[in-house]
Image: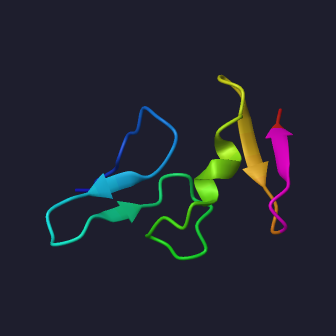
Amino acid sequence: MARRVIKEEKGSFELKPQKESAHICMCGLSKNPPFCDGSHKKTLDEEEGKVYEYDAEGGRHEIV
């Protein structure tokens, strides 16, 4: 059975079961997957209802 995470808000997903919290990347832009490296900050001003992709240089492009 496949598992998936459905998120409601922008940003990382925090795991707290260990000594220190670990943040899991939810945007797919992290250079250190599955862990968050803060790359989601690029997505904070995305418009709701639109879909974007990011190129290797971090440029954002709306997908029509």
Q: Is residue 59 magenta?
A: yes
> Compared to 19, does 52 lie above or below?
above
Tell me what residue is drawn at x 61 percent, y 74 percent: 31
Could you tell me residue 36's position as x and y percent? 48, 64
Q: From this viewpoint, which residue is outermost toward the bottom? A: 32
Asked whether 1 or 56 is in front, the reply is: 56
Left or right? Give the position of 56 relative to 50.
right
Which residues make up the magenta segment? 57-62
Tell me what residue is drawn at x 72 percent, y 26 percent: 47
- Rendering quarter of residue 45: top right
Tell me what residue is drawn at x 83 percent, y 32 percent: 64
Instruction: Point out the image quarter for the N terminus.
Output: bottom left
- Total number of numbered discs in the rendering: 0
- Rendering quarter of residue 59: bottom right
Could you tell me residue 12's position as x and y percent? 45, 52
Tell me what residue is drawn at x 82 percent, y 49 percent: 60
Could you tell me residue 5's position as x and y percent? 35, 47
